[in-house]
Image: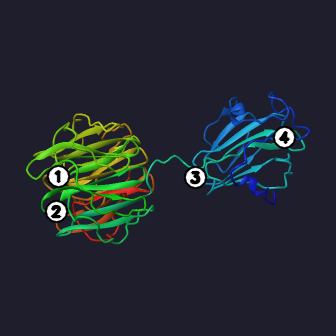
Amino acid sequence: MSGIIGSRLNVRGSGLVSKLGTDGQVLTSAGAGKQLAFGDVAGGVSWQAVETGSTMTAVAGNGYPIDTTSNACTITLPASASNGDQIVFTDYARNWGTNAITIDSNGLNYQGDPDTSTVEYTTDGQSVNIVYSGSTNGWIPIEDDTVTDAPSKGNSEGIFGFGDDGDHTAVTNLVSDAGVVATDVAGVGTARTSPGACEYGGDKGIFGFGTTGSVTAVTNLVSNAGVVASDVTGVGTARRYIAACSFGGDKGIFGFGHDGSSIVGMTNLVSNAGVVATDVTAVGTARSHLAACEYGEDKAIFGFGDSGSYTGITNLVSNAGVVATDVAAVGTARGQPAACGYGYDKGIFGFGYDASAVTAVTNLVSNAGVVASDVTGVGTARYGPAATQYGGDKGIFGFGYDASTFTAVSNLVSNAGVVATDVTGVGTARITVAACSFN
């Protein structure tokens, strides 16, 4: 084939075709000249297994999810066809914009053009529903729409902020959608250590609580461009060594901590507008120095910490922000770990202090909120780091104390939950940092 059939095949389709040509009136029992809706004709299609190959031969009456994550795909249509034959192709992994599909009409016309033309579909999220209309027009797309926006499943960028570099600081470091940590951004808001941070509103973040020498409940909102705002007056019990994470897709929760005199377990919900609510009575074992992350796309989990001794107990959080009673500990009991989401619907706890030494051990969290046994540590063992997701489905641990010095080293987490070796630190080395994602 040579040449490209016009851009009508490479952009969002204009919708339905009502006139099929003089030999196309038998396309549908709906009547000549009536429009064909996708749902009217796709119901009888026999859907096949996901196709990942670089070539395939299509059969009339079938639907094919085409995954071009690893390679482009050339699709050969049947060498002969009858009026009304139908085939559907859909972009399984939203990658046609990177690796296109090419349709070889195998000697038959395609949308009125001969087989000497190249037919490509190059738009992420596209679905192509073709029907044979007779020899003149041949195969015609009765729908070639795209899904304009992929469902939002994870933010693409992150931010580390605040902490102890030998003194209280408010410095922040942005994380790109490739997991690259940027140099320091001058601090905004009250400098403090051991705050928490989480997402809210689907694309923004919030830092809250911590200590300035005395405990505080002050918060600082983070815009969807990663800009930290000035202080918002604290709501709820002032405390440090707190954990936070998002839930419900667009809300957040701060929980547990130390109020300056004792370990506590109350929580504070964050609305989808970033408003922190008053205390919710504690559920589960009161503790400080814990971590929290998302799982299952809309739920959360608090885990590990110091309740007077180090523990590995966890508490699940529903998609309505309700904290459940204790789940028995799994994995090495420890304090000052960090946690974040990965893979869109799973989580990971990592690093910390286990009462005898710093560690890099990690524990994966399934999409049902089940914590797995220890995975051998990778990277510099340390406590007091922070973690956040980036790139939508990956994570990053960063900063902390390695038993001898503050560090800014980071470790990327793949979308399969695999922790990578150390990346040289960027920014001010510090401990008791917080982190969250934004978009």
Q: Are marks 4 and 2 in contact (CB under 8 Å)?
A: no
Q: CA distance from mark 2 to mark 1?
A: 10 Å
Question: Which of the two residues, 216 or 149, is positioned nearer the viewer here?
Answer: 216
Q: Can you tell which mark lies on residue 212?
A: 2
The quadrant holding residue 59 is top right
* Residue furthest out toward the top: 29
**Which residue is disc 4 drawn over?**
19
Q: Residue at x 37, y 69 (%)?
A: 182
Q: Earlier in the sequence, mark 4 or mark 2?
A: 4
Q: Nearer the viewer, mark 3 or mark 2?
A: 2
Q: Earlier in the sequence, mark 3 or mark 4?
A: 4
Q: Can you tell which mark lies on residue 239?
A: 1
Neighbour tally class for label 4: few under 14, some 14-19, many 20 plus, Cα within 10 Å? few
Q: Can you tell which mark lies on residue 326?
A: none
Amino acid type at circle 2 is Thr
Neighbour tally class for label 3: few under 14, some 14-19, many 20 plus, Cα within 10 Å? some
Neighbour tally class for label 1: few under 14, some 14-19, many 20 plus, Cα within 10 Å? many
Q: Quadrant of the C terminus?
A: bottom left
Q: Is residue 242 visible?
A: yes
Answer above or below: position of 427 versus 314: below
Q: CA distance from mark 3 to mark 1?
A: 46 Å
**Which residue is disc 3 drawn over?**
69
Answer above or below: position of 365 versus 357: above
Label 3 element class: loop
Q: Nearer the viewer, mark 3 or mark 4?
A: 4
Q: Position of residue 110 (x, y in %)?
A: 82, 47
Q: Are marks 3 and 1 in contact (CB under 8 Å)?
A: no
